[in-house]
Image (cartoon, rainbow, N blue to C red):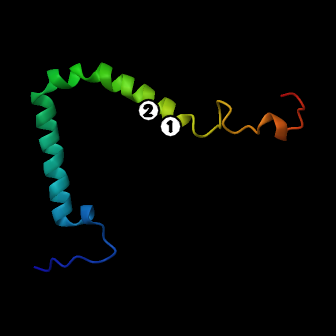
Amino acid sequence: MNSEHTEGTPFWRSPIGLALCGFLAIAIFFIALEHRAHLLGLWPLLFLLACGGMHFFMHRGHGGHGHGQLPSNKRGDDER
């Protein structure tokens, strides 16, 4: 039985990695099945966290809220 790990193969595609992924999937399924009431009680909190996370991460891309603007004296405005 040759169980050498080649450099180009990721761990999760090896036989041990596949067995570990299968075991973790089954364990997560049974834990979720047994603790369904606890998990369903967390949905409102997870929804609020997701909204805050999307707001935080999605505002980075468009330069909104005046962070990308030049100061008024650099634009040629003489008002102070």
Looking at the rendered structure, the kind of residue marked 1 is: Phe
Out of 76 and 52, give the one closest to the viewer. Answer: 76
Dot 1 corresponds to which residue?
57
Q: Are marks 1 and 2 in contact (CB under 8 Å)?
A: yes
Up the image or down, 71 lies above or below 13; here it is above
Q: Secondary structure at mark 2?
A: helix
Tell me residue 42's x, y (percent): 25, 23
At 38% from the left edge and 23% from the top edge, which residue is drawn? 48
Dot 2 corresponds to which residue?
53
Tell me residue 52's x, y (percent): 44, 27
Q: Residues within 10 Å of mark 1 (few under 14, many from 20)?
A: few
At 22% from the left edge and 19% from the top edge, which residue is drawn? 41
Q: Is residue 3 left or right of residue 51?
A: left
Q: Is residue 62 left or right of residue 71?
A: left
At 20% from the left edge and 53% from the top edge, which residue is drawn? 21
At 64% from the left edge and 37% from the top edge, which residue is drawn? 62
Distance Cα–Cα, label 1 vs label 2 = 6 Å
